[in-house]
Image (spheres, coloured by chain):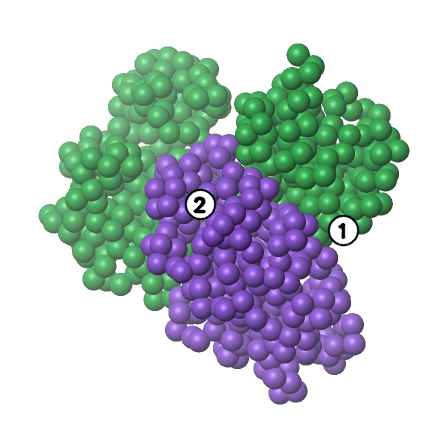
Chain colours: A purple, B green
Amino acid sequence: MGILINKDTRVLVQGITGHEGSLQTEQMIDFGTNIVGGVTPGKGGSEVHKKPVFDSVKEALGETDVDASVIFVPPQFAADGIFEAIDNGIELIVCITEGIPVHDMMRVWAYLKTSSSRLLGPNCPGITTPGASKIGIMPNPIHRPGNIGVVSRSGTLTYEIVDTLSKNGIGQSTSVGIGGDPVNGTSFVDVLELFEEDPETHAVVLVGEIGGTVEEDSIEFIKQMSKPVISYIVGVSAPPGKTMGHAGAIISMGVGTALEKIQAFEKAGITVAKSPSEIVRHVKLPPYKV
Amino acid sequence: MKLYEYEAKEIFLKYDIPIPKSSLVSDIYGAGEAAQKMKDVVIKAQVHTGGRGKAGGIARASGPLEANNSARRILGMSIKGFPVKKVLIEEYREPLKEMYLGITIDRKAKCPVIMASPQGGIDIEDIAKNSPEKITTVHIHPLAGIHEYQARMLAKSLDRNNIPELIDIIKKLYRVFIDNDCQLVEINPLAQTKDGIIALDAKMVIDDNALSRQDFPEEENGSLEEIARKNGMSYVGLDGDIGCIVNGAGLAMATLDMVKYYGGTPANFMDVRAGANEEQVKKALEIVSSGKNVKSIIINIFGGLTKCDEAARGIIDILPELKIPLVIRLSGTNETEGRAMLEKHGIRLAASTEEAAKGVVELGNSNQ
């Protein structure tokens, strides 16, 4: 059921005592996520929402098993938090933090490659499998269990699409936000591979945006997939050379326009929806019918 | 953040990368004085845009009188909308050969990439398009740094007669790139002169996410972009007449696209960020409504961290001063409360991004 997480996934919250860390921990507990504790250096021994707080990931691992960690640490310390999770062999690291310097992320990526950890994000809303577990900050009420996999570079746009699907009676297997930074961990292709293998996922909605070529890079894999992929790419009205909110959303040296991506997808025969409601129409059309 | 040529060259100087003697001036008197010392000079407009040369923002002068005249002309210029407030008076160095050297981030490889071309002085994009075989690229492992053999390969591709000197410059430029959290550092042209290799131009772009640990003075220009940034929001001015306020970058882009899809033209991009509160929404309305040509505004909030009732309060706060019609969509956290508050004030509410975009475009059409 779904990818990467399930109801048994034991989650550690790095930065649990901060405002957002604490608030989102409560939301995750409400959703049904198995939160086993949190980490904030210097706050070890305290509790947040009845969950134990440790000074380090290593100390947490001395008390409990951990399958995944979620990072709410401020941007200037977030890379360190990721390194700590990697060094402690955490399988899945979800980094919510926005604003991490890109040089830090290049170093993280080089380090990550030599480990067995998977990083989702940074600058992402996390991952949700309805009815099972949520790691991240997607609003609780919008999800509905079902068979559509959602993967997106955005936060609130993911909520909009998941909400639109749910309101139209279309449930999701898992919704994944890979993040809006120029250098991140898990890619579109990584998530598509998992959806392709997941028996609960019958079709995938891929939400892309301007900047870089991660959409184009996924075309070859999509063409080989047995499951239909419906895409939606935003930023048609974005001018070149300007960062559109996300650090990674920038048309730079003429590369990364929405139009290029849309044309590349259409040329490859991949469905491109022009709006969230059109995504619903495509999902409901045969042979995609849910 | 883009640095000016003179700022980038000040950094080069610290790292011992050769640059011409120069003097930064903001009035013509300074220009004459500087030219007196150096005799044969180049006067270069300091602006954050390319194509200075074509626009007449670069002039060569011999002697103070000529330098004064050129400086007067260039200081009064505006290049692609950027007024020239400072000029760099530089000693003229005759290039015997113009090369290109740049370092940027390869998003796909997720590491720094150094690009070198024996042909410089023109845009790297043009070299890449017309003669890609003339560009040598080398990827650098961010944890290992640049290896000697990599610098040697690049140096050889630039000019096999000056390898040791070029290796030195390449390694220093990589330090500049790392130490200053650069997204881009570029020397174009990197010139061979009779007295050695020298950086005739310099371009640096710093990662905005790293500005808190770097020490670059931010230039204040009072633009809406700047006001938004200081309030933790992201604004980009566009050409249209429909103001846009959205929480989240992806949803903001989607909203702009929808406005365009229904036949409208957005006046701006505005991401108030997830978690925006009453004050921020109010501030966002102030900023967006002060954009020129804004005739109507669409507000699209999908509450997660942002609470709809707080957003509604921010909107209601500024309502009495606002002369521009609004179309609002509120969904998510505390949606019912937020919508009820706005309905009391007779504000038009939409159920989805698409409905809101359609609504705001229709509003514009009916007002004409």
Farthest residue, direction right = B344
User: Which residue occupies 51% across, 32% down?
Assistant: A237
The x, y position of residue B17, in whole percent, is 31, 46
The x, y position of residue A93, in whole percent, is 54, 69
Horizontal placement of B79 versus B318: left or right?
left
Q: Nearer the viewer, residue A143 or B191?
A: A143
Mark sitting on residue A127: none
As drawn, B19 above or below B357: below
From mark 1 to mark 2, how far is it between C-alphas? 32 Å
Q: Mark 1: which amino acid?
A: Thr
- The residue that mark 2 highlights is A271
| Residue A121 visible in the picture | no
What is the secondary structure assignment of the residue under circle 2? strand
Farthest residue, direction bottom = A62
Horizontal placement of B292 versus A273: left or right?
right
Rendered image quadrant of residue B234: top right
The x, y position of residue A29, in whole percent, is 73, 70
Badge 1: how crowded within 10 Å, few (<14), some, or many (20+)? many
- Chain of the residue displaying label 2: A
Screen quadrant of the C terminus of chain B: top right
Horizontal placement of A84 versus A132: left or right?
left
Mark sitting on residue B333: 1
Badge 2: how crowded within 10 Å, few (<14), some, or many (20+)? some
